[in-house]
């Protein structure tokens, strides 16, 4: 065990596809452990071959069941698959496994299936950045299909799925008012819309309504040089029976191979660029936080926060002082490096 | 209209409690308009008297209805009240009003009631910071009770409510598996738990289960110098009929006056400090983004993001270059200021 615990060999073990090493690497990233930077550096050259599929939808739409069905479908042809499920429940209260996720444990002994839950809270650098970095580990480990599953009701959670190469939005017929509003918001990020529970009354009507809505909707606000397909596909499925799942996987695969529609490849490139931007920004922010949070500055920062809380200093003035402090530190460092 | 459109008078009009000026000020903050910094500076000294009440819960628990009932209760004794409702639906698709929110329009002519929906997406500095700044405007305008209403299923959305002085978590009896998991996560941030729809079968049992869960739960992870009440109160209410709403308001008021339990005042102070920290950090980040996003750096940053997207550069190396670039700019500026 001794040598295998070193960082170098952790990267090597990840690249070899070892499940425990992958799990450990993702934990380091999730915990924002300083060693995760080295790890990512070591594996990064081996990334870029995976296709990331975001799966999101309102609570109760059946996301976990659908992802389970997609895993089963992929396994029938021997394809490996990894899942990062962003769980709205918390690690403190025990991170209760959602009902359907228990089913995924059926693949516990299958080394070509890797399933990981991540808590949605406590990622200083942003949930989208953390999950993209975790996906990079799975990518380096050789998984070619990676699902990012989130509940599509929060800003951060939607960003995770929207940062994937293709985003599948799940809907179910007949849900409450609040859920309807959530659905409307989610359609913007959809590449593929799946009306789940297609065996229920109203499913066909829901699909027709969605197609009408999507036809009426204004073209999405994307830069001119990055065309996206005009509107997402709307498919019907019943995840619990597997009905329509093969068709969904085929639609995903068409997008992955870039043959589905004109512009898909460019859209995928845009998603990769957005993911890279989110990751880099999260690290920049983390670096700056570290600098301001170290012994020299922590007390000053704390005093500034307290002054704002006491309404003695406005937050903009406090921010200016922190930015100045950061600049001054850099200046001191530069002067220290000057020849004397 | 001419003079009244200047920034100085916008601040004055906010301080005078003028509804249109308040709405305009919150829009500037929501749009991250550069003039919002000046505005906040001008009103900040007048803030600090409002009590912020977060209201959150899973979709369908009845948050909007409960907030409507609380408004009605406050108005019976002539108290003014403001609401910021963070809406999971999107501005692009029209920001569909949730069913119950329509009812709030009943107060459209009442200048002591201010209700504002904010989209949950697109806040670069973070949703919690934006809503805290918007609350500061309402505070300066003289509102002493401000509700921050969010759907408690996303990381950012929960942070909004949790940053309030007191957080009310709404639960409803008998919801699905996924919602149960969300409930468990939400209990951590609760000061007051309300079991809504108390007229439904199972409400009493839900309340008993919650009390048992909260008794069993480990004490919350807070610094030693900031004690919090050992466990939240659990109340029953039926928002749609108003049953239990007066008792809920009394519980909120006890916390506001700091007499409810030992430690509440310290907890409220901790919330204010957390809010200040979030606001200042959001502004620091925004300032840094501006600096890196200006003409001199935008092309370089864009090249770095593309290199990461193309897997030619790892995100940590890209972040280092951006941080160095920032430091170099500061150094150049300092050198420019040196006497020659």
Image (spheres, coloured by chain):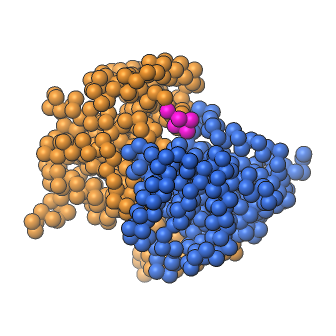
Chain colours: A orange, B blue
Q: Nearer the viewer, residue A336 or A90?
A: A90
Taking B23 as reference, is A69 left or right?
left
Residue A23 visible in the shown view: yes
Rendering quarter of residue B14: bottom right
Q: Nearer the viewer, residue A61 or B215?
A: B215
Q: Is residue A189 above or below residue B193?
A: above
Residue B148: x, y in percent? 63, 55
Where, quadrant-wise, is the C terminus of chain B in this rendering?
Answer: bottom right
Magenta region, main secondary structure: helix
The residue range painted magenta reads A175-179
Q: Residue at x 24, y 57 (%)?
A: A25
Residue B58 visible in the shown view: no
Residue B250: x, y in percent? 67, 65
Q: Residue at x 49, y 29 (%)?
A: A174
Residue B335: x, y in percent? 57, 69
Q: Residue at x 18, y 32 (%)?
A: A75
Magenta segment includes A89: no
Q: Nearer the viewer, residue A159 or B220?
A: B220
Q: Residue at x 17, y 55 (%)?
A: A20
Taking B49 as reference, is B153 left or right?
left
Q: Is residue B81 above or below residue B178?
A: below
Rendering quarter of residue B112: bottom right
């Amino acid at each position: 065990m001794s040598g295998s615990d070193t960082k170098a060999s952790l990267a090597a073990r990840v690249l070899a596809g070892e499940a425990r090493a992958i799990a450990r690497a993702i934990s380091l990233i999730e915990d924002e452990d300083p060693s995760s930077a080295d790890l990512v550096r070591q594996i990064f050259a081996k990334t870029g071959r995976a296709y990331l599929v975001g799966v999101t939808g309102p609570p109760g739409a059946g996301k976990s069941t659908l992802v389970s069905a997609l895993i089963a479908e992929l396994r029938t042809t021997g394809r490996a698959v990894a899942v990062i499920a962003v769980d709205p429940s918390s690690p403190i209260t025990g991170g209760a496994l959602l009902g359907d996720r228990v089913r995924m444990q059926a693949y516990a002994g299958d080394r070509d299936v890797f399933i990981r839950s991540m808590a949605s809270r406590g990622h200083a650098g942003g949930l989208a950045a953390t999950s993209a970095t975790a996906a990079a580990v799975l990518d380096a480990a050789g998984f070619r299909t990676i699902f990012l599953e989130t509940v599509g009701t929060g800003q951060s959670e939607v960003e995770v799925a929207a940062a994937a190469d293709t985003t599948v939005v799940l809907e179910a017929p007949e849900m409450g008012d609040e859920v309807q509003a959530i659905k409307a918001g989610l359609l913007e990020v959809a590449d593929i819309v799946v009306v789940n529970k297609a065996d229920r009354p109203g499913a066909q009507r829901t699909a027709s309504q969605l197609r009408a809505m999507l036809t009426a909707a204004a073209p999405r606000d994307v830069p001119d040089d990055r065309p996206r397909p005009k509107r997402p596909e709307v498919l019907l499925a019943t995840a619990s029976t597997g009905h329509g799942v093969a068709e969904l996987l085929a639609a995903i695969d068409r997008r992955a191979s870039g043959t589905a529609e004109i512009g898909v490849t460019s859209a995928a490139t845009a998603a990769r660029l957005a993911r890279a931007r989110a990751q880099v920004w999260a690290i920049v922010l983390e670096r700056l936080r570290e600098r301001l949070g170290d012994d020299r500055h922590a007390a000053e920062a704390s005093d500034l926060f307290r002054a704002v809380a006491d309404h003695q200093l406005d937050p903009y003035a406090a921010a200016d002082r922190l930015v100045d402090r950061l600049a001054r530190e850099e200046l001191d460092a530069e002067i220290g490096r000057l020849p004397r």
